[in-house]
Amino acid sequence: MSDRSQTDPGEIAAGGPATPEELPDAEYAKGRTLTETRENLKESIEIIIEANHELTWLEIGSDAIREELLVAA
């Protein structure tokens, strides 16, 4: 997975709003610094992945085979 996100160039020093290109439905993450914005963006992505995981689990039921897949970022 790449570390690409959209940020407002005028607010980079302040850690302005950002959203991941790969997850356009993600909420915009904001922070006081660029580092804080990245941390908030990571948390937002984790929440989306977990929610999608739970929705999929409810849809396919408990008969499905579940395996963990690790993706290096």
Image (tube, helix red, strand yellow):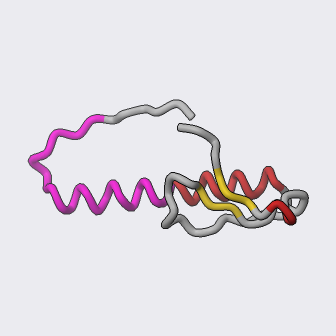
> What residue range appears in magenta?
46-67
In this view, 54 is above or below 1: below
Q: Residue at x 52, y 30 (%)?
A: 72
Identify the main secondary structure in magenta.
helix
Q: For this rendering, which residue is in front, 38 or 63?
A: 38
Q: Quadrant of the C terminus?
A: top right
In this view, 50 is above or below 64: below
Q: Position of residue 4 (x, y in %)?
A: 64, 46
Q: Residue at x 16, y 39 (%)?
A: 65
- Residue at the far left: name it: 63
Residue 54 magenta-highlighted: yes
- Residue at the far right: name it: 13
Q: For this rendering, which residue is in front, 2 or 39?
A: 2
In this view, 10 is above or below 20: below
Q: For this rendering, which residue is in front, 69 or 11?
A: 11
Q: Quadrant of residue 29?
A: bottom right
32 lies left or right of 1: right
Residue 61 magenta-highlighted: yes
